[in-house]
Amino acid sequence: MLEQTFQEKIDAEKKIEPKDWMPDDYRKHLIRQISQHAHSEIIGMQPEGNWITRAPSLRAKMILLAKVQDEAGHGLYLYSACETLGVSRAELIQQLHEGKAKYSSIFNYPALSWADMGAIGWLVDGAAIVNQVSLQRTSYGPYSRGMIKICKEESFHQRQGYEIMAEMAKGTPEQKEMAQDALNRFWWPSIMMFGPQDSDSPRTGNAMKWKIKRQTNDELRQSFIDKTVPQAEVIGLKIPDPDLKWNEERGHYDFGEMDWEEFWNVVNGNGPCNKQRLAHHKKAHEDGKWVREASKEYAKKQLNKVNS
Amino acid sequence: MNNNLFKYVLRIADNCLILGQRMSEWCSNGPTLEEDIAMSNISLDMFGQANGFYDYASQIDGQKSADELAFKRNEREFFNFQLIEQENGNFGNTIVRNFLFDAFNFLFYTELSNSTDKTLSALAAKSLKEAKYHLRHSKNWIIRLGDGTNESNQKVQNALNDLWHFTGELFEMDEIDNELLKVCVSVDLNKIKLEWDKIINSTLKIAKLERPTDSYMASGGKKGIHTECLGFLLAEMQYLQRAYPNAKW
Amino acid sequence: MTEQTTVWEVFIQSKNGLAHKHVGNVHADDKVMALENARELYTRRNEGSCIWVVKADNIVSSESEDSEAFFDPANDKIYRHPTFYTMPEGAKHI
């Protein structure tokens, strides 16, 4: 009976709110998905954060810092949304540190040159935007509202990345080479951000039924590729896929096969930066412990003063 | 070109840039996410201020752009306070460094808003709002950490003891300060020293911290004499522009 | 072992004269920090002229199983809306 009312709400495009009854699996699925999304934003601060001190102009510095700061904010919105499901931020951080929670694999790739800032903004944020625009219509209220807020802020992220690539592509030969190299390294990992093919994705069924997901992995991946290929052409960079071809009949781009071995390796913890990203996060957390303790102690003392 | 004015403006710009750079190093390293964002905001404010002052310096110079001034001067050509370039260390260290400077900067911009140089006064008035918030931020943290746990009190007291000898430089008036004071362009640093003392003393008292005794005071930042950490900071900051001298970014 | 912080709900008034709107929450140990964290997180794009923070524990919410009794009775009292009334032709300012 409860399950039926719940599904009717979903089918009628109504939002499920924190106090509503929901199936246990719905709650679990959301906690996993939202927390993973939140962790991704926070870990995602690292590859770009590394380049802030080396940004080559005052303007570039400020823009990159504003972008990375936004990622922190997005992480916070998402942790907040996740907490409405009955789990605390502290527990979520613990899960991340213990390797029980995942984050988007793309951030396990290193940012090796300034051009990577361009590639990450253009491709990684571009892919995130495709995913997030779709998620604005997700069935869980707090997640949907978080997504709407995030989408409003996200568009400058992609633009700043694309602008970097465009400028470098028409700059010195070394700059153009740097930009092409970044594209070569980030193209396939960006495509992989959309996850396994639908045929290999067991959770897609429920996610679609409960309108947590509004489009499938393959649909979103295709949408991203269709948008991005012309963008590369406009700035004169070549996408590293020899099988990439416009298919007039389908009205979409055909593209090559992904390296699924690499995909699963990185997802399962064997990517270039997995250890480093987590170690960085743990260190910041550990180093800050005395600060958080002091802050709590101070607040307690103030309360005692008021109450005495 | 007015060399005195040029150098005076560069000093202010350099303080903003170097502090902005130090604060940006905290990105993804903060004790909480909320504080990570707060420190990035401070960094952004400082870079914005740096931009404004470098633009003015560039106008006075008539040759180099703001970016060239920031990215192509070497260690002996930077005129920031030695206090500003000190490494972040732990969070307590950063807060103490910032607090000592923020109290100064708030008072400095307040006075500079009355400068007869219209551009300087406008830049100062605009930056003052941010300076006020930065002082609030660092002051609140000094108090939280000073009156927090024994460990936090100890860490902050150590930082205060370590950084105190950099505070004397903040109030030194040299020939450039004095020349420009004659035409009411620059700030009389002696005037703001008393106010600075008041802010420091009252805050330290609430924070249960002891003000270190004045002894040896470091000096030289305004003349391009720095501590050894500035070289590393500049090497990192200027690397791309130096490695690709013909590129536009 | 896990550290717990207090959650504060945040309400922002975007412009003078408008009502405060709920925008989300922040974690903070005291009200000063809560206000500052809310400022950092929710007003980076000029979205605020005034911030309220309220401890999440202090928010009282209506229950969804009460919503029928709470809200449906208002649905059929359409005489509370001005559109319910027919005004004579030519009558002005009413």
Image (cartoon, grey):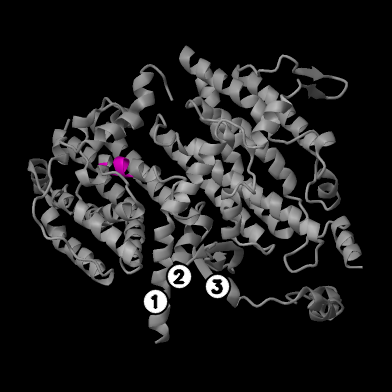
Please report the residue visible at 68 percent of the width from the left and 35 percent of the height from the top: A193
Circle 2 packing at 10 Å, graded few (<14), some (14-19), many (20+), is many
- Confirm or deny contact between disc 2 and disc 3 (CB under 8 A): no
- Badge 1, how many Cα within 10 Å: few under 14, some, many 20+? few
Q: Residue furthest bottom?
A: A308
Badge 2 or badge 3: first in the primary sequence: 2
Tag 3–tag 1 contact (CB < 8 Å): no
Which of A133 and B150 lies nearest the eye of the viewer? B150
Report which residue position mark 3 lands on: C55
**Which stretch is magenta?**
B15-19
Main SS category, magenta section: helix
Q: Amino acid at mark 2?
A: Asp
Q: Is residue B187 among what the camera can see?
A: no
Q: Quadrant of the N terminus of chain A?
A: bottom right
B222 or C16: nearer the viewer: B222
Q: Are marks 3 and 1 on the same chain?
A: no
Mark 3 surroundings within 10 Å by alpha-carbon count, few (fewer than 14), some (14 through 19), many (20 or more): some
In the image, taking residue A300 as reference, residue B93 lies left or right, namely left
In the rendered image, is residue A139 in sight? yes
Q: Nearer the viewer, residue A285 or A45?
A: A285
Q: Who's the residue at 78% across and 73% down the image?
A: C64
Query: Which of the numbered marks, if any, corresponds to residue C30?
Result: 2
Image mark for residue A302: 1
Image position, residue B24 (x, y; %): 39, 43
